Amino acid sequence: MKRIAPDFDYFCPSIRRNLQTAVALESAGLLRSAHVDFCLPPGQIARSVERVAGPRAANRVVRDIPSTRIHRHPQLMIASRVRQRLYLSGRDTTAVDRVLTRMYSAVARQCESDAVVGTQSSCLELFEGRSYRIMEQISPPVRYERAIAAEELARFPEWEEPDKAAVSSFWDHREELEWGMADLIWVPSPHLVNLSSDFGADPRKFRVLPYAIVGPQSAEMSRGVKGRRALRVVFVGTLMLRKGVQYIYEALRMKPSLPIQMEFFGPPKLTSEGVRCLAEVGTVHGSVPRAQLFNELRRADVLLFPSLAEGSSRATLEAAAAGLPVVATEEAGGPASAMVIPSRSPEAIIDVIEMLADDPARLAELSEAGLAEASTRNLATYTESIIGMLGSGSATVPSR
C-alpha cells in the first residue's frame, strides 16, 4: 500500500465504537499506537467479563489491532468516573479536572508521532507541538446538549430530576480550543457540522466520515410484504428526555387508535412519573442482554428513534443491519436509509405510523435499503474513506 501519511498515534480515553477509527488506521497501515483507558482482546476472558459485567462489556472488546500497539491507561477510567459523579451531583470538579489533564499530558508524552488523532474534549494536550492534528468529534457540542436538556426539562418537569450538574466552562473551553487547533475534524453525521459552527467552529475543517455499520446482518432478514395490522414499534436507547421518548408518549396519547404495539428497551434515566407515562402507551422493558435485543430487532416492524441530540445513534445502525426499518430525526445521525421526521413533533410520529401501517410495501423497501446500506458501509469502506480523505489533498500531510 502506498504511504500517504505518517503513522498516527490515536487517543480515545473511553472506548467508542470498539475503536473503529483506530482499527481503520491499523488496516490502512497508518497506526503507530492506540491509547485507551481499558479494553479487552476477543476470547474467553472477554466473554467471562461480559457475563459478570453485563452487555456493555462487549463495547470494550477490540479486534484487529495487535496488542503491541494498544496502550492501556486504566487510571483514566477511575478519574473520569470520579469526575462524572462530582459533576452530576453539582459539586466542584476543579481538582479532578487538573488530575485528568495531567493524565492526558502524560499520555501525550508517550505519543511520538508528529501526526495524531484525538477524540473530542480529550485531545488538547495531544495536539500541542504536532504538525498534523485530527479531532474525532463523536457528539454535539456540550453547550448544545445542555441547552436541549434544559428546554425539555422545562416542558416536561415531572419526567426527569432537575439537573444538578455544574456548568463546566473548563470543558467547554477545551472543546473550543480543540476546534481551533485541529487541522481536520471528523464527524459521523452532517448535522454536527452546522451545530458546531453555531458554537464557533470553522466549518471548513469538517469532514463527514460515517461509522461502519456493524450488527446482526443477514441477507435473509429483509421484511416481507404483509397486510395491514398493528405495527410492532420499538425504541432502543436510554429512556431520557434528550432521546425524545416524551414525543412518542404525546403522539400515542393524542391518537390512541394508532395501529401500534409500542415497546421501549433501555435503561431509564426518567423519574418514576416519566416511566409511568411511557408505560401508559407501551411496554417498558428496561435493559436487556444484547443477544436478546438483536432478537427483538428481528421481531419488530419499525425502530422509532426521535432523538434531539446525537452524534450517530448506534441503535439505528444496528437496526439497519438487522433489516429493521428505521424512522428517526435528523438529530439522531441515523443511516442514510432511514425515514427522517422532524424532531419534537408528535404529529410527525402519528403521520409516519399511519402511513407505514397502510403501506407494507414501503416497510419492505426500507428494510431492503437498510440491509443494502449495511452491506456496503463496513470497516473496509470506512478504512477506504479515511485513506481517501488523507490522500485527497484536503489538508497538508507532513512528509515522513
Image (tube, helix red, strand yellow):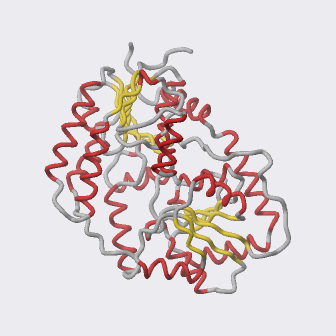
Q: Is residue 23 above or below residue 296?
A: above
Q: Position of residue 103 (x, y in %)?
A: 22, 37
Residue shown at the point (78%, 57%) measured from the top left: 365
Specify whether 52 is left or right of 362: left
Q: Position of residue 206 (x, y in %)?
A: 43, 42
Residue shown at the point (61%, 33%) measured from the top left: 381
Give the camera-side residue of 92 and 145: 92
Q: Is residue 355 above or below residue 364?
A: below
Residue shown at the point (33%, 71%) measured from the top left: 150
Specify whether 372 is left or right of 195: right
Say whether residue 176 is visible.
Answer: no
Q: Position of residue 10 (x, y in %)?
A: 38, 30
Q: Is residue 265 above or below residue 318?
A: below
Instruction: Please tell me how many numbered marks the rendered image carries.
Output: 0
Say whether residue 202 is visible.
Answer: yes
Q: Position of residue 382 (x, y in %)?
A: 57, 35
On-image quarter of the C terminus? top left
Q: Quadrant of residue 363?
A: bottom right
Give the camera-side residue of 138 and 236: 236
On-image quarter of the N terminus? top right
Specify whether 397 is left or right of 24: left
Q: Is residue 326 above or below residue 394?
A: below
Residue shown at the point (46%, 22%) measured from the top left: 30
Give the camera-side residue of 153 and 56: 56
Q: Residue furthest left?
A: 95
